Image (cartoon, rainbow, N blue to C red):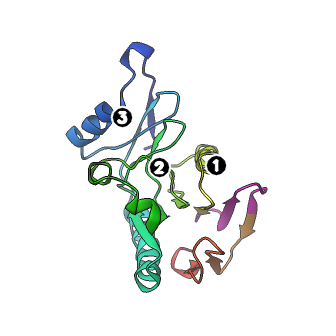
Amino acid sequence: MTAFILNMPPVAKLTDEQFYQLCQANRDLRLEMTAQGELIIMPPTGGETGKRNSDINLDLALWNRQNKLGIVFDSSTGFILPNGAKRSPDAAWIPTDKWDALTSEQKQKFLPLCPDFVIELRSPTDKLKTLQDKMQEYIENGTRLGWLINPQDKQVEIYRQDREVEVLNSPNSLSGENVLPGFILNLELIW
């Protein structure tokens, strides 16, 4: 099953708070909203994608626990990007100073910022172009490094500020570069 997009007329445009409440009232659904106000309803992932997501988040969280440089978020965390889109990457990271700058209330709801690092993991039902557009949106809103991991084609697209997208075929690992110093994701668990 692929994602379903519900076009919202301008009179039905949801505020950030209304979207948050909609998500809270429908916890079994994975919801996102584009900057144009389209509501995206995504199906749950299957077992293989869920396992891959779990492995990715475990590795990122362990690196972060050892280095204490920031905060790691899983796919159920909502971010309100500067362009107004509400997104939930499969994995995300922000530096500690960004987290500390948020109020207690902001930390309880969808975070009003763009992560410095994001990962999107393509599931069998995801359209590649949709994920590529989403990755570009993250970069345009402040993400410094992003990985689009495509297990079906054994490819990774690396997104960086002010650079062309780099495509790697069947890489064994990925480096967090200067955004996540010392972080290496072993892709043998993914392929």
Vertical position of residue 17 compared to residue 149: above or below: above
Report the mark closest to the observer, 1 or 2.
2
Instruction: Name the residue that disc number 3 marks.
Output: 16
Q: Earlier in the sequence, mark 1 or mark 3?
A: 3
Task: Indicate the position of residue 55 as horizontal and vertical percent values.
Answer: 43, 75
Q: First in sequence: mark 2 or mark 3?
A: 3
The residue under the point 36% across, 34% down is: 16
Residue depicted at x 65% and y 63%: 153
Q: Mark 1 points at which residue?
A: 132
Where does the N terminus fall, quadrant-wise? top left
| Side (left or right) of 31 relative to 157 | left
According to the picture, the residue beneath numbered tag 2 turns out to be 113
Q: Which of 129 and 136 is in front in this view?
A: 136
User: Which residues lie in the magenta part?
Assistant: 150-166
Write the residue at 55% across / 60% down. Answer: 116
**Magenta run includes residue 63:** no
Residue 80, x across and y down, in percent: 44, 43
Query: Which of the 4 image quarters holds residue 167?
Result: bottom right
Q: What residue type is labelled 1?
A: Gln
